[in-house]
Image (tube, helix red, strand yellow):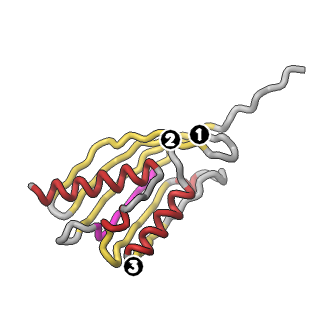
Amino acid sequence: MADTDAKRAVVEEVMEAVMAGAAGSIARHFAPGATISQRSNAEQSDTPWFGRMEGEFRLHGQEQARAFFDEMLKRTSYISYELRGLVCEMDEAASRCDWSRRDDKTGTLITGTTMYWFAFTSDNRIRSIETIGSIHSVIPSRKAETVG
């Protein structure tokens, strides 16, 4: 039970840090050689607001993990998010997060959901994270009309 609680605490800390935009010291939770795989349905839209980092990334230590999360957080900031459950069993965990964000340049509002799957090493460090994001809506900013 204590092992599951430790993994649950790691997932909660990583999820909160990423969604709140403050990576803090989460790099310490990643095993050397950890992989992060990110995919989404963003390619279905031509809008330039989605500065995504899709693909598979291998993190060769804490410095590289810190740099990866710093870059990711520069490209993504959420105005709201809600963690929607966490399941942790043996050496794996899964979580879901609903979110919304606003593009700073255009004011476009984007809402979506991301699923997260975590795999752990025997010493409770993250071996891999797989994410699949789904954008639900893209609402363009309404420009103020001038009365003439």
Circle 3 Cα neighbour tier, 10 Å, few/some/many (<14 / 14–19 / ≥20): some
Q: Please check the rendered image and state whether residue 144 is part of the magenta-colored stretch, yes or no.
A: no
Q: Amino acid at mark 1?
A: Leu
Q: Is residue 147 found left or right of 91 in the rendered image?
A: right
Q: How far apart in space, not on screen, are marks 3 and 2 (Cα)?
A: 31 Å
2 or 106: nearer the eye?
2
In the image, which disc is placed on residue 109?
1
What residue is shown at x 66% (from left), y 40% (from top)?
A: 107
Q: Is residue 113 found left or right of 104 in the rendered image?
A: left
Main secondary structure type of the part rendered in magenta: strand
Q: Kindly report which numbered mark, 3 or 1, lies closer to the viewer in this rendering.
A: 3
Query: Of helix, strand and loop, which one carries label 1?
Result: strand
Q: Tell me which corner region of the image, top left, top right, bottom left or bottom right, holds residue 128.
A: bottom left
Q: Residue furthest front?
A: 24
Residue indicated by mark 3 = 60
Q: How far apart in space, not on screen, are marks 3 and 1 (Cα)?
A: 35 Å
Coordinates of residue 144 in the picture (x, y in percent): 76, 28
Query: Above or below — where is 139 with respect to 17?
Result: above
Q: Please check the rendered image and state whether residue 128 is part of the magenta-colored stretch, yes or no.
A: yes
Residue indicated by mark 2 = 100
Label located before the other in sequence (3 or 1):
3
Q: Give the extent of the magenta segment.
A: 126-133
What residue is shown at x 47% (from left), y 44% (from top)?
A: 112
Label located before the other in sequence (1 or 2):
2
Coordinates of residue 71 in the picture (x, y in percent): 53, 64
142 or 79: nearer the eye?
79
In the rendered image, the quadrant that contains the N terminus is: bottom left
Q: Residue furthest left?
A: 1
